[in-house]
Amino acid sequence: MRSETTFQRIISNTGILAISRIVNAALSFIYIPLSIQALGLTEYGYLLIIIEFVTLVSDITQLKSWQTLLHYGTDFWKHKNIAAFQHILGLSIRFDLISSFAGAGISFLCIHYFNQYMLWPSSYQHLAELATFTILFMNTGWSNGILQLDEKFKAISLFQAISSCIQTTGCFIGSLFHLKIDYFLIIWMATQISLFIFTSAYAAFLVKDKITFRKFLSLPLQKIEYPSGIVSFTIKTSLSDIIDEVFQKGSFLFISKFLGPQNAAIYRVTRKVSTGISHLSQLMVPTIYPVFVQLRNKNEWALINKSLSKFLALFSKISFVCLGIAIFFGNFIMYKMMNIQYSFEKNFLILLLISSLIDMYFVPVRAILIVSGKVSLVLLIRSIVITLYFPVSFFAMKYFQLMGTAYSAVLSSAIIFIYSFAYTKVFLSQKTNELLNS
C-alpha cells in the first residue's frame, strides 16, 4: 500500500510537469518548421550549432546545486530547521553564481580567440558572443531546488509552458516578416532569460517567510557551515551530468564537424522528436529525488525496490506505445517537422527512439544510485562509455553516415543501463536483507 502511495505521488507530480512538456512538444511542431522555412535548413543548422555550443559550455560548467539542496536540505526544510537549511541554500546559490560567471567567461574566450576553428562561419562570431550572455541566466539550480522541495510542480510546469509560448510567438513573427538568424537567436535568448526570471522570482517569494530578504541577499557571501562531503557530492553529481551533456551536445557538434550542418540539423530535430516522445522519464527527475531521499533517510529500501519495479513496468508500456507511433507515423512526423524527405528517416527515428527509451529506464536507477551514495559508480560507467562513444561513432559514421550515429547511441545507452541496473538490484537486495536480519 505504501509503495502504491509513493509511486502515485511521483507519477502525479510528473503528470503536472508533463503538461508543460506536452505544450512544448506541440509548439515545437510549429516553431521548428517556421524557423526552417524562414532561414533554410543550412542557416537553421548554424543557428543550432551556436545554441548547442553555448548550452554545452553552460552545462559543462554547471554545478548541480539543486541535487545538493535536495540531498542535504530535505530534512532541514521538512522539519523547518531554517538555521541549518540556509547554509545549504547559501552554498547552492554560490555554486550557481560560480557556474554562471565561469561558463560565460569560458564561452566568450573560446569564441573570441578560437572563432576560426568553430563550426559556424567567421562572420557569425558576434552572434555567438551575444549568445554567451545567456549563460548568466541558465543556472536555475537553487530556485528549482526550492520549487521541488515545496512541491510547486504546477509553477514549474507553468513557467516552462510560458517560455515555450514566447519562443513560438517570436518564431511566428520571424517567419511572417522573413527575419534573419540574429532575430531567431535573440528569441531563443529571451526564452531562456524569461524562464530564469520566473523561476528565481517565485523561489525567492517562497523563502521570504522563512528568511528575510536582506538575509537572503547575503547568503552567498556569508560564512557557510556545511556537512562534510557536500562539496565532493556536488562535484561528482555535476561531473556525471556534465558527461551526459557532453555526450548529447557533443554528439551534435561532432556530427556537424564530419557530416556538415544539414546532417547535423537532421540529427538534432530527429533527436528532439525521439526524446520528446519518451521524455516522461526525464520529467520524473525533479519529482523522484525528494521522495527517494526521504525513503533513504527512513531506511525504506524495500519500498524503493518496489517503486523501481513499478517504474520499469510503466516504462515497458510507454515503450510499446512510442515504438508503435514511430513505426506507423515516423515518416509523417519527420516530414512535418522538416518539410523534407530522406530515405532513412523512419529507421533513423526508431533507432534514436530506442536509445531514448533505454535512457528512460535508466532515470530511476540513476536516482537510486545517487541517493545511496554511489555517485562514483555512475560517474565511472558513464565516463568509460562516453570515452569510447566518440571513436566508435567516428568509424560508424565513416561506414554508415548519419545512421552510424544512431547505432552508436543505442549501444552506449544499453551498456550504461544494463551495468547500472544489475548493480542496483544487487545493492537493493543486500540492503533489504540487512534490515530483515537486523
Image (cartoon, helix red, strand yellow):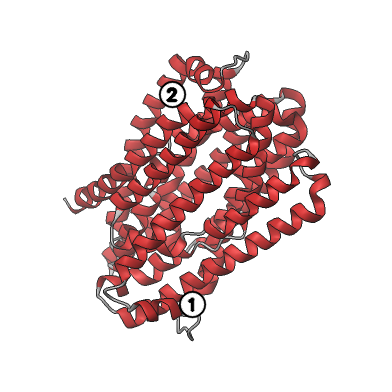
Task: Where is residue 297? Give x, y as percent.
Answer: 31, 68
In this picture, is 181 found above or below 228?
above
Kind of residue sitting beneath label 2: Leu
Which residue is painted at 45% across and 16% down in the image? 329
Compare residues 288 and 100 and report the one nearer the observer: 100
**Pointer 2 with pointer 1, Cβ within 8 A:** no
In this picture, is 280 found above or below 285?
above
**Gap in angstroms between the C-alphas marked 2 and 1:** 47 Å
Q: Residue 191 vs residue 2: left or right? A: right
Task: Where is residue 146? Give x, y as percent.
Answer: 36, 64
Task: Where is residue 409? Give x, y as percent.
Answer: 60, 35
Kind of residue sitting beneath label 1: Pro
In terms of secondary structure, where does tag 1 sit?
A: loop
Work out whether residue 358 can be spotted: yes
Task: Where is residue 65? Give x, y as percent.
Answer: 48, 65
Observer-side mark, 2 or 1, equals 1
